[in-house]
Image: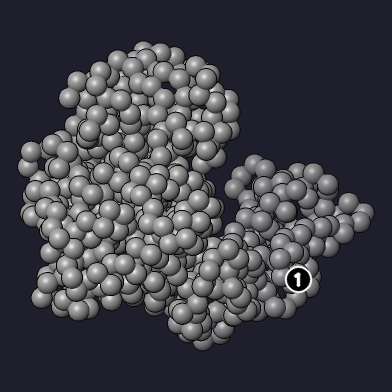
Amino acid sequence: MNENVIRATRNVAIVGPYLSGKTSLLESLLSVTGTITRKGNVKDGNTVGDSSPEARDRKMSVEVNSATAEYENVRFTFLDCPGSIEFAQETYNALIGVDAAVIVCEPVADRTLTLAPLFKFLDDWEIPHLVFINKIDRACTDEITCGSNFTEVLNALKSVSSRPIVPHQYPIGKNEQIIGFIDLVTEQAYHYHPGAPADPVPLPEHLKAQESAARQEMLEELANFDDHLLEELLEEINPDVEEITRDFKMELGADLIVPVFIGIAEQDFGVRPLLEALLREAPTPETTAKRRGFIQSENKVLGQILKTYYTPQGGKLSLVRMWRGTLADGALLNGVRVNGLYRLTGQQTQSLQSVSAGEIVAVGRLEGLRTGDVLGSDELLPKAEIISPVYALAIVPEKRNDEVKLSSALAKLLEEDPSLVWEQHGDTHEVILWGQGEIHLKVGLDRLRRKYNLPMVTHLPQVPYKETIRKPASSIHGRYKHQSGGHGQFGDVYLDIAPQPRGEGFNFTDKIVGGVVPKQYIPGVEVGVREYLDRGPLGFPVVDVSVTLTNGSYHSVDSSEQAFKQAARLAMQSGMEKCESTLLEPIAKVEICAPNECTSKVLQLISGHRGQILGYEGKADWKGWDAVSVYLPIAEMQNLIVELRSQTMGVGFFHWEFDRLQEVPEPLAKRVLLTTGGNGNGNDKR
């Protein structure tokens, strides 16, 4: 289709749980619009949506994929978003730049709970959204239950949406099959045909009562936002199709309702009516920009980065929503020259000379700019909050020579995926990669291997245990004397060692009188004490200890700061053996959030991980969810997110922060010391 006949654009995200069929829906949309001539499927790994090697290896979406299609002189940009909760950050970053979202789900009432976080995000951001119930044939176990199962799914959707759920269609079943649908706006029935538009057919007699009831419910929901329609219903006037369509457009565009469509994406069933609804009822980019408060009369460029890619051929690409103005290739943007403008369809790119407000395109080589950044203006635009990491692996390059390349590769990896975090732990000195779960980190590690030739060896991070003392020790003597010809080395100290209250840390003082230890040597004593405390008798850093220098002696020729440092280490080594060392473990304060029907399972999970339950209450602004406050040993949190999701249909999550250090129970402490060999390697491999 020629560029000059395009009269409008729509930017639509396709979202939903893992295995709901989002990528299949995108493939069908591209097929029915003629964008692709041959449909792929997820199993064969040849779809437009799952185009990365990491996605094809796992047969699941792991990043946002963009695809452009043209239909009825309107250009659609579809963003196929990952369904796994571990890649939710990708989805949220993309959603802030679209005009509407299609939530794809299966017709299983018990699984609608998995949609709760998605509905919450869309509702909080007031992003217009509709539902496509995919694989609707699974609801039609027989002709009689087809409608009742559909109604059950609608009721389940109402429990996770703060907006009214409004059916646009009603299923027609025959025996154990779905054969078509009724358009509740026009009251026209249709029969499906694989790979072809549905045929209009007479409304089945046995469904007239159900259709009438469903249509009346639809009209009543629409009338809640249209006084004229409400008057017509009260006067028993049948509203015309144009008025109903206008109401859908207005109320969807204002994020007041959630229309519901049905179909089977793999067979193209219901996909054309969905596309028509997006064309007819979804908000335009101009409507979205107005809702977001952007003044379109200004010509100054305003854009926002929704996603960052590093491609083998083209280098860095930034997926950008253009909110305002026109951007030309080669223009200077945020101090960086644009090096290419592209429309994406999977891995394929179409070069452009310029792009206008309302489009989502890829921009080449925006070095120094990251996902969420604003382009062309110093305006502050809201961006999706970064989800706190909950799962970690320690990583080491397989080849030692690759260590020098690791930090730059990790920087690029984190640009592509902002929900990844890396750190070099101050106590264990491990390089730790944090993310949202096991699959999430494995995908990141695959990218390191494929894109940057950096294969990694991984293991669970060491637990940063500490140790402290229970008893004091007084007048501990340490003398260092060394003679090797010429000037010797001499230092002599007496130390008092005492425990401090938990959390007080280390304190060093001196009570030297009469210059028995000259002032210039006292800093050396403190250095020697500190160096010893880096690794105590149990093999871990020592905390919450006070050390006082009380006495000593020196030699006018042989004494030095270094000699007194060694004397202090000897005194500490001798004294700490008398102080009854004990092992400390880090304790986190954790808020675990889950649907209230899963709360009892969460409480059992906490009890099985040595947790202390502080209480629980309804989670604010989350209908039907609880927030459980607990103290948990960090040693017990390494696989917590995996177990929590298994108990909550994959939707449970938690936030945590370090709270304090606490003594490890003696039987467990013995086991930790046995597994670590008392060498400070706190990876408890129970």
Q: Which structural element holds mark 1? A: loop
Colouring used for the render: one colour
Q: In this view, does 605 lie above or below 309?
A: below
- The spot of residue 475 in percent (x, y) is 79, 70
594 sits left or right of 307 in the view: right
Give the mark count. Answer: 1
Residue 347 shows in the view: yes
Residue neighbourhood size for the residue with mark 1, other residues' Cα within 10 Å, grouped as few (<14), some (14–19), many (≥20): few
Q: Is residue 422 above or below residue 332?
A: below
Q: In which quarter of the image is the C terminus?
A: bottom left
Residue 112 shows in the view: no
Residue in the picture at 76% in, 69% down = 500
293 sits left or right of 516 in the view: left
55 sits left or right of 16 in the view: left
Residue in the picture at 83% in, 63% down = 550
Residue in the picture at 46% in, 49% down = 251
- The spot of residue 274 in percent (x, y) is 26, 49
- The spot of residue 245 in percent (x, y) is 36, 47
Residue furthest bottom in the image? 667
Viewer-nearest residue: 4 or 299? 4
Amino acid type at circle 1 is Pro
Q: In which quarter of the image is the N terminus?
A: top left
